[in-house]
Amino acid sequence: MFNAIEVLASGLSAARMRVNTLASNVANAETTRTPEGGPYKRRDVVQVATTLNSQFGNVMDRMALARPSVQAVVADNSDPKLVFKPGHPDADDKGYVAYPNINVVSTMTDLMSASRLYQANVSALQTARKMAQDATRISIRF
């Protein structure tokens, strides 16, 4: 039971990081100037799954739990979108402004998905916690 709670808690943390990163991407979709220079660079979350050792032997090996975790948050190094806006303060000598390579529609869809994943993890964690409490009460009665 504690392995399941550990996996769900780790999933919550990873989902929260993904939601925050996607929200930052949406918020900076029009940012043309950053302290590093140039437009904002889209951030992507790299997640990995670490398999937990099963305590149930060979029967449960096929159903081993994997703990998700964030390995890194990486900046996208693809070319920015160039938009012709000669009057913009950040326009180059040809009149083009470099915007972040962020598709707001697909990023919002990913954000909704990540938010639902977070909510599902919260529900599963609450259920696992209740099951652990109920199991404790059952074992106390015997």
Image: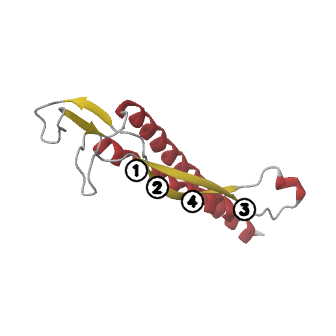
Q: Looking at the image, is mark 4 or mark 2 nearer the viewer?
A: 2
Q: Looking at the image, is mark 2 or mark 3 nearer the viewer?
A: 2
Residue 43 position (above or below residue 109): below
Answer yes or no: do the residues labelled 1 and 2 have beta carbons within 8 Å?
Answer: yes
Answer yes or no: do the residues labelled 1 and 3 have beta carbons within 8 Å?
Answer: no
Mark 4 / mark 2, whichever is N-terminal: 4
Q: CA distance from mark 2 to mark 3?
A: 23 Å
Q: Residue at x 68, y 67 (%)?
A: 136
Disc on res. 62: none
> What residue is pinned by disc 2?
73
> What residue is pinned by disc 3?
52
Q: Position of residue 35 (x, y in %)?
A: 24, 57
Which amino acid is tagged 4?
Ser
Answer yes or no: do the residues labelled 1 and 4 have beta carbons within 8 Å?
Answer: no
> What residue is pinned by disc 1?
21
- Say left or right for 6 vs 76: right
SS of the residue at dot 4? Answer: helix
Mark 1 / mark 4, whichever is N-terminal: 4
Q: CA distance from mark 1 to mark 2?
A: 8 Å
Q: Position of residue 83 (x, y in %)?
A: 25, 30
